[in-house]
Amino acid sequence: MFMPGSRYEKMPTYTVTQANGRDVTAVRLPLPNPGALAGYHRRLVGQRLDHIAAVYLKDATAFWRLCDANGCVVPDALATRDLVGVPRKG
């Protein structure tokens, strides 16, 4: 259902029945899992998380790991931060 390496790839799913009787499969939202940091990146104006992830993590689609490392569930929560913690590789 999700791309390999996605933060949702191994999350459990559950089924919800909507008011119209239709069943929908949903995935639980993973909570941030801050780990050890390799350091910090001083974010430039307009610099996107996928660009930072591409440089430090060698994978632009791993921007969610920056969110986790900074205790954020969604990328927009990092929008106002000047310093972004960079997780260790692995």
Image: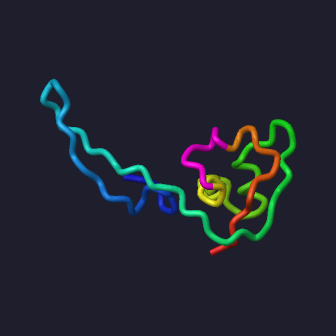
Residue 59 percent coordinates (x, y):
67, 60
* Residue 72 in magenta stretch: yes
Residue 26 horizontal side relative to residue 35, left or right: left
Q: Residue furthest left?
A: 21
The magenta stretch is: 71-77
Residue 12 percent coordinates (x, y):
32, 58
Residue 62 horizontal side relative to residue 57, left or right: left
Q: Nearer the viewer, residue 61 or 81?
A: 81
Residue 47 percent coordinates (x, y):
80, 42
* Residue 6 in magenta stretch: no
Quarter assignment of residue 39: bottom right
Residue 74 percent coordinates (x, y):
57, 44
Residue at figure coordinates x 76%, y 44% from the top left: 81
Residue at figure coordinates x 87%, y 43% from the top left: 44
Residue at figure coordinates x 54%, y 48% from the top left: 73
Above or below, 90 against 48 in this view is below
Q: Residue furthest bottom?
A: 90
Q: Nearer the viewer, residue 24 or 79?
A: 79
Instruction: Say how many tags the image has.
Output: 0
Please state, as top left, top right, bottom left or bottom right, where the C terminus lies in the image.
bottom right
Residue 68 horizontal side relative to residue 31, left or right: right
Above or below, 75 against 6 in this view is above
Residue at figure coordinates x 62%, y 53% from the top left: 67
Q: Residue furthest top?
A: 20
Q: Describe the colour scheme in one phrase.
A: rainbow
Quarter assignment of residue 46: top right
